[in-house]
């Protein structure tokens, strides 16, 4: 007999995947006419938002309200909306808004579901690349339907590590991150979307991802993907108000865990 929680998970996974496709299509439509968007700034001139972010989040929230009205929702643009079901959706409508508004393809729609504080569903849609990453607890991870499984022989010396940074972190701290990776005989990339780089860890394109301060909506879908592909992640604090605050984010393929934990100090 199928347990109630498993049935609930299957239903939400189907919704998350459908929303990933629909929201990705809407975001791509805005991307193709981005010169018409009014760009606003939030915390600083590099932290930008547009109607595309808001409308994509509105779409996702409306679909969740229709299907699971008792679920909680945390979105980057409209904050936390409480619920009673024990499930929490964590959504970044467009992660990588800066690449998005500047005409670069490195952005995505990120949709996660938490249950008992654990990421149990992760869907990341990268419309410019025609890629949909999907994972659920105990069900594995896929990219466009193909199973993802990490290679334990890859490490920070023979593969690339993704890094992220923002104005929550000092330039000196970022410089030290880079220095430690290079001193460990590794190399790094940064593409402007932490969620997408976490998906790339799950896909084996990157061997790990490290960002000293990141929000739940940026990382939880990627965390589920990495775990289900055979990797590891440093837990994100999800208790109460901590879910709405930033924290260190670190995810790695098996062969990079020790090195990246040492570099991140976790």
Image: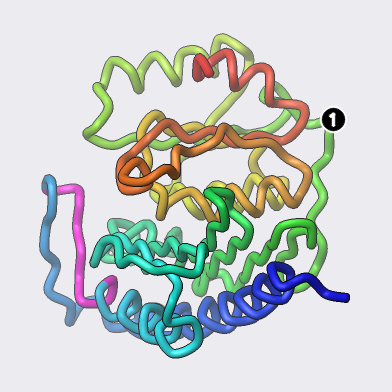
**Residue 75 higher or lower than 24, as above or below:** above
Instruction: Answer with left or right where residue 46 lies relative to residue 117.
Output: left
Instruction: Answer with left or right where residue 205 lies relative to residue 192.
Output: right
> What residue is drawn where x is 70% and y is 52%?
203
> What residue is drawn where x is 29% and y is 61%?
80
Residue positioned most to the top: 183
**Residue 15 higher or lower than 149, as above or below:** below
Query: Please, what secondary structure does the residue beneath circle 1 have?
Result: loop
Which colour style is shown? Answer: rainbow
**Magenta segment includes 76:** no
**Residue 258 rendering spot, x and y as whole percentages:** 68, 18
Q: Which residues are magenta?
A: 45-53
- Label 1 crowd bin: few (<14), some (14–19), many (20+), radius 10 Å: few
Name the one closer to the observer, 199 or 72: 72
**Residue 176 rendering spot, x and y as whole percentages:** 39, 14
Label 1 sits on residue: 153
> What residue is drawn where x is 68% and y is 25%?
257
């Amino acid at each position: 007999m199928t347990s109630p929680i498993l049935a609930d998970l299957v239903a939400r996974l189907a919704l998350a995947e459908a929303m990933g496709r629909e929201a990705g299509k809407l975001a791509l439509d805005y991307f193709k006419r981005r010169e018409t968007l009014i760009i606003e700034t939030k915390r600083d001139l590099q932290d930008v938002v547009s109607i595309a972010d808001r409308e994509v989040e509105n779409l996702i929230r409306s679909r969740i309200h229709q299907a699971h009205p008792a679920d909680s929702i945390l979105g980057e643009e409209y904050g936390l909306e409480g619920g009673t079901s024990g499930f929490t959706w964590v959504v970044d409508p467009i992660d990588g808004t800066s690449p998005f508004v500047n005409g670069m393809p490195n952005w995505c729609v990120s949709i996660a579901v938490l249950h008992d504080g654990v990421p149990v569903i992760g869907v990341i849609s990268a419309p410019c690349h025609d890629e949909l990453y999907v994972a659920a607890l105990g069900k594995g991870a896929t990219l466009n339907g193909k199973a993802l499984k990490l290679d334990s022989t890859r490490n920070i010396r023979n593969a690339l590590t993704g890094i992220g940074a923002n104005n929550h972190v000092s330039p000196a701290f970022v410089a030290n991150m880079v220095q430690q990776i290079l001193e460990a005989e590794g190399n790094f990339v940064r593409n402007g979307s932490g969620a997408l780089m976490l998906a790339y860890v799950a896909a084996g394109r990157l061997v790990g991802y490290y960002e000293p301060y990141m929000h739940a909506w940026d990382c939880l879908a990627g965390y589920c993907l990495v775990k289900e592909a055979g990797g590891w992640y440093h837990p994100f604090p999800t208790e109460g108000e901590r879910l709405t605050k930033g924290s260190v984010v670190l995810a790695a393929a098996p062969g990079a865990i020790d090195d990246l934990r040492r570099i991140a100090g976790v």
